[in-house]
Image (cartoon, grey):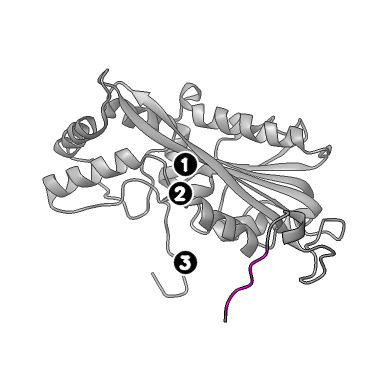
Amino acid sequence: MTGSQPPRLTDRTALARNRARARDAALFLHDMAIEDIQDRLAMVNRTFTAPAVVTGHPGKWANIAGTETKIVADDDILDLAEGAHDLVIHAMALHWADDPVGQIIQCTRALRPDGLFLAILPGGQTLTELRAALGQAEVEVTGGLSPRVAPMAEIRDLGAILQRAGLALPVADGHPFTVSYTSPLHLMRELREMGEANALHARLRQPTRRAVLTRAAEIYAQAYAGDDGRIPATFDLITLTGWAPDDSQPKPLRPGSAAQRLADALNAREVPLKD
């Protein structure tokens, strides 16, 4: 790899293969993401006439914003024309992007003035238990550590990315939640059925040793299993919102232009700082 080439996070061939094997019944994260996006669109007092959705699961997201929605693959170069859309949704794919900032910038350029950008993706707390168990097991069994779970950004970092992409009124919010499974192996099987198996470019290219998986399941159960024997798995869905800049949008007031002191508005006593 030369110095001019960006680092590769994802093996796109492996990712496409994994997604092709996904089962609709296992895509509960997408169902939750769709419900979240629909709720947010319902709160926006606007009818979108030229929406686009960037996703790796086109069948799941085809009707999120109406029958005229343009479905775009989450390739490095997005098939989005500049200024062509009043709504762009990046749907459950940004965590596999080699250049997430570039993806959001491309979406921003595709928006008309005052167009809406929404993205939803797994955040940094996703699968914390599995990461820990697999890492400890691999070190114990093989004496080394290999990439197994895609790195996922924290919410504060994603909020900063919105600003870097030039979006106005940026907001990043989300919530972690817990799903329980019969065993760690059942969790790993469902991740494969979600199309979220290991597709990292730097992953090992041979099957994981059975001893690593067995030891990881033991560590997971010992550290996290509940009284009923089931194991928890944390997922963290983060939603990003931003608007293409437009003169009609509210602007922050110029510093010092307030007509009333904050202390008076709060009916509080103001204590000056000592030199």
Would you say residue 129 sits in the magenta stretch? no
Q: How crowded is mark 2: few (under 14 residues within 10 Å), some or many (20 or more)?
A: some
Marks 2 and 1 close (CB-CB < 8 Å):
yes
Residue 121 placed where, x, y %? 53, 43
Q: Choose top left, top right, bottom left or bottom right for residue 194.
A: top left
Q: Work out whether 103 lies above or below 23.
A: below
Image quarter in which the C terminus is found: bottom right
Q: Please identify the residue farthest to the right as the structure is shown.
A: 248
Badge number at residue 16: 1
In the rendered structure, the answer to whether residue 170 lies left or right of residue 255 reads left
Marks 1 and 3 close (CB-CB < 8 Å):
no
SS of the residue at dot 1? helix
Of labels 2 and 3, earlier in sequence is: 3
Q: Please identify the residue farthest to the top as the structure is shown.
A: 228
Q: Which of marks 2 and 3 is in front?
A: 3
**Residue at the location (77% across, 55% down)?**
265
- Going by the numbered disc 3, the residue's amino acid type is Pro
SS of the residue at dot 2? helix
Q: Which of marks 1 and 3 is in front?
A: 3
- Going by the numbered disc 2, the residue's amino acid type is Arg
Residue 97 placed where, x, y %? 50, 53
Image quarter in which the N terminus is found: bottom left
In the rendered structure, the answer to whether residue 30 lies left or right of residue 26 reads right
Res 73 visible: no
- The CA distance from mark 1 to mark 3 is 20 Å
Badge number at residue 12: 2
Badge number at residue 31: none
Badge number at residue 6: 3
Q: Work out whether 148 lies above or below 104.
A: above
- The CA distance from mark 2 to mark 3 is 14 Å
Q: Choose top left, top right, bottom left or bottom right for residue 248.
A: bottom right
Q: Residues within 10 Å of mark 3 (few under 14, many from 20)?
A: few
